Amino acid sequence: MSTTNQQYDSVISSCKEIFIKKASDYGTAWRVLRTISIVDQIFIKAQRIRTIQEKGEQKVSDGIATEFKGIINYAVIGLIQLNLPADAPEEMNIAEVSISYDTYVLAAKTLMQDKNHDYGEAWRSMSQESFVDLILMKLQRIRQILSNDGKTIISEGIDANYNDIINYAVFALILM
């Protein structure tokens, strides 16, 4: 498990570096995004990976790894947005963004550790294609929850789906 934790931390460190640099360049412009827009951004990235997998080629230089990192960062944005009050200012300072990023990634990592305990790291035997399909399924679930005004009867909420998306993308990157 310590290898998994180190690999997880390495992937997240790379993603966070991108996230913080973009926040330095653009500020927190993503604060204007509603949940459905974040879902659509993740969808675009996951769909691009799926298309590249199916066609076996790509024409835009950003690779699959870059898209998985984008998926992780948009899922973190989704978690931050879900937990900010509606009247929170659009602009957040870098220190606040960094703390928020760490908070939500730690929650996703803790979930990963708990599931790895129960499932025995079954993800290590999965294909990259499966991770993409699972991410797309989680996005469909979030869309359905949104169409139900955020209410579920028995299922986990939007945050749980974002956490799973983060973990699937981290797994894909570890296996790359």
Image (spheres, rainbow, N blue to C red):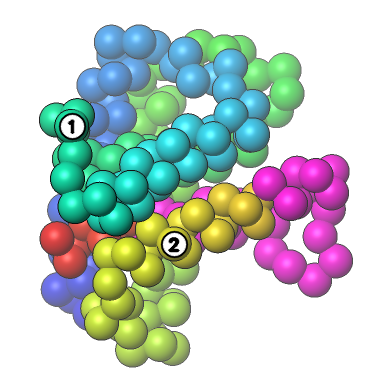
Residue under pointer 2: 133
Of 90 and 95, nearer the camera is 90
Q: Which residues are magenta?
A: 143-168
- Quarter of the figure with residue 81: top right
Instruction: Indicate whether residue 46 is drawn in magenta.
Output: no
- Check disc 1 and report its element: helix, strand or loop: loop
Instruction: Indicate whether residue 156 is drawn in magenta.
Output: yes
Q: Position of residue 93 (x, y in %)?
A: 41, 16
- Looking at the picture, does residue 7 appear above or below residue 88? below
On residue 136, which mark appears?
A: none
- Looking at the picture, does residue 21 appear above or below residue 26? below
Give the residue at x 19% y 29%: 60
Q: Which residue type does callout 2 highlight? A: Asp
Question: In the displayed structure, does residue 14 sit left or right of residue 165?
Answer: left
Q: Nearer the viewer, mark 1 or mark 2?
A: 1
Q: Which residue type does callout 1 highlight? A: Lys
Residue under pointer 1: 59
Give the residue at x 80% y 44%: 147
Q: Position of residue 161 (x, y in %)?
A: 57, 57
- Looking at the picture, does residue 12 appear above or below residue 15? below
Give the residue at x 49% y 20%: 30
